[in-house]
């Protein structure tokens, strides 16, 4: 590891510990030349995840897009930002756990809706109405009937 102060190419690790988020390792290092200390972070290199859109185009997976969609669906609902981020984290973890480099956008939406249905039914219907592009009130009512049928 190159020293950020003098540029010397060698250093020793003084201390290693998990960072706050638990996904990185924080290392305190000391330059073997100038003896100054600095911190580095080690993270797991992730395989890129590509989302195949309905029109066939491909985009890099972006968890922020999921969070933004959930924020809109949960507006004025008793759902905290922590819960929204947890849903997005769970979806990303499940997708990365599959070890596939590509995923259909429909699958991502379904995964979000599965979790959102458990979290808040109103937010679920809002998200589904945009995601599934309800064409008319009849399609919307059919989705509501499914929810009501599952509750009984």
Image: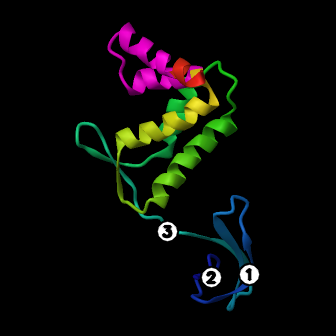
Where's residue 145, x and y in %?
48, 16
Query: Is disc 1 in contact with disc 2, using a CB cutoff of under 8 Å?
Result: yes
Residue extending farthest to the front is 152
Most foreground residue, 9 or 86? 86
Left or right: residue 3 compared with residue 140: right
Q: In whole angstroms, how far apart are the C-alphas of marks 1 and 2? A: 9 Å
Q: Residue at x 67, y 35 (%)?
A: 81
Where's residue 13, x and y in %?
71, 85
Above or below, 22 against 136 in this view is below
Regarding mark 3 in the picture, which secondary structure is present there? loop
Which image quadrant is residue 33 in?
Answer: bottom right
Most foreground residue, 61 or 141? 141
Disc 1 designates what residue?
36
Which image quadrant is residue 25 in?
Answer: bottom right
Disc 2 designates what residue?
6
Query: Is disc 3 in contact with disc 2, using a CB cutoff of under 8 Å?
Result: no
Regarding mark 2 in the picture, which secondary structure is present there? loop
Q: Residue at x 69, y 91 (%)?
A: 32
Q: In whole angstroms, how far apart are the C-alphas of marks 3 and 2? A: 28 Å
Q: Nearer the viewer, mark 3 or mark 2?
A: 3
Q: Nearer the viewer, mark 1 or mark 2?
A: 1
Q: Residue at x 48, y 25 (%)?
A: 127
Residue 87, numbered circle: none
Residue 45, numbered circle: 3
Q: Crowdedness of circle 3 by 10 Å Cα count: few (<14), some, many (20+)?
A: few
- Magenta segment includes 143: yes
Q: Crowdedness of circle 1 by 10 Å Cα count: few (<14), some, many (20+)?
A: some
Left or right: residue 7 compared with residue 19: left
Dominant secondary structure, magenta: helix
The stretch of residues the image draws in magenta is: 122-146
Task: Work out which quarter of the rendered image holds the N terminus and state it.
Answer: bottom right
């Amino acid at each position: 590891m190159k020293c950020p102060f003098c540029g010397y190419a060698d250093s020793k690790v003084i201390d290693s510990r998990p960072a706050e988020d638990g996904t990185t390792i924080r290392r305190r290092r000391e330059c073997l030349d100038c003896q100054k200390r600095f911190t580095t972070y080690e993270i797991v290199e992730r395989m890129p995840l590509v989302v195949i859109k309905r029109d066939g185009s491909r985009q890099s997976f972006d968890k922020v897009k999921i969070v933004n969609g959930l924020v809109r669906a949960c507006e004025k609902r008793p759902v905290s930002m922590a819960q929204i981020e947890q849903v997005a984290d769970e979806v990303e973890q499940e997708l990365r756990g599959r070890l596939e480099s590509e995923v259909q956008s429909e699958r991502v939406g379904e995964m979000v809706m599965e979790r959102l249905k458990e979290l808040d039914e109103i937010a679920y219907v809002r998200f589904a109405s945009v995601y599934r592009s309800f064409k008319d009130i009849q399609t919307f009512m059919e989705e509501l009937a499914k929810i009501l049928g599952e509750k009984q």
